[in-house]
Amino acid sequence: MTRDPQLAPKDPSCTAILRPVVATACYSEHTDILDTKQARLALLELGWSITLPTNHAETGLYRALLSFADRDGHVAQTFHEIARRHKQKKTAFTKTLASLAEAKWLNVTKVGRCKKIRLDLQRFCLFALFDTDQLFSRDEAWIITQHSGHQVPAQRMNEGRRSASAGLFVTLAPPPPAPMLVVRDERKAMQFDTEDKPSAGMGCQRCKAAGHFCQSRGWAGEEPLCLECGSNLPCERSLITRPLAVDSLEARYGT
């Protein structure tokens, strides 16, 4: 397992949001069934490449089903359609890799007696945990996808070995919310997000004293009455910790 610098994603935001970790399982050469004692998981980060010996791929030593999906999940459905064409063939795994290479989802190059498979993780991420379409046998269909922050319980792993129909999917963590921008001038200050045009408002006194930022789209403590709740008590919605940008702006412009 080597790291190819050319496979590093060009879009930094893609790396920060997706950051998928790929796990492949090693199967027993004699029984074609996953041996829990000898199984090893190869964790592949963005930019890593998988090297599979040709003879092992043909005999079924490595039978990891690679499923790729874009953010809408369309590619995964297309992958299953392509792989289903080779379901009845003994070399289904090798044929599937060839089909993925034709679709430019995988870059397969033969080096000596080995095939180097480069995962195109810039556009897709491995997301399927089980072969719900049963492209291979139920024991062969066991596969793990691990995303940072997502752990698969051991009982579900064992369940996946027994039945591929017990599909379980790990979804990527949702992207962080849109950042809140704080703008202040000498006359007034207001809080607004990047999608909604703000309306000016003032905060109540106790919001600032409690260290909270009033959500009435105004500076906490600028006026004795809060335009959101109509009193000098903390607003019902002022539960967000005051961002650091507030302190930095206050230090620059004063309170």
Image: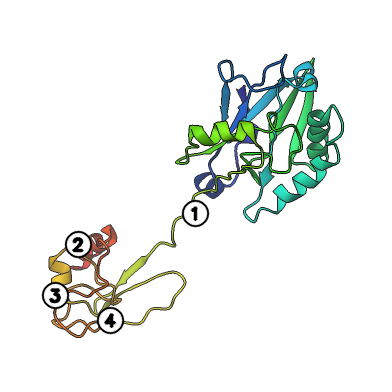
How many angstroms separate mark 4 from mark 1 (CA)?
A: 31 Å
How many angstroms separate mark 3 from mark 4 (CA)?
A: 13 Å
Which quadrant would residue 131 be assigned to in this image? Answer: top right
Which quadrant would residue 149 be assigned to in this image? Answer: top left
Decide which of tag 4 and tag 1 comes sooner along the chain. Answer: 1
Could you tell whether 158 is left or right of 87 in the image? left
How many angstroms separate mark 4 from mark 2 (CA)?
A: 21 Å
Q: Is residue 77 above or below residue 59?
A: below
Could you tell whether 155 is left or right of 95 in the image? left
Q: Front-most of 71 and 4?
A: 71
Could you tell whether 36 is left or right of 164 in the image? left
Q: Which residue is mark 3?
A: 205
Q: Which residue is mark 1?
A: 174
Q: Which residue is mark 2?
A: 251
Q: Label 2 is placed on what type of residue?
A: Ala
How many angstroms separate mark 3 from mark 1 (CA)?
A: 35 Å
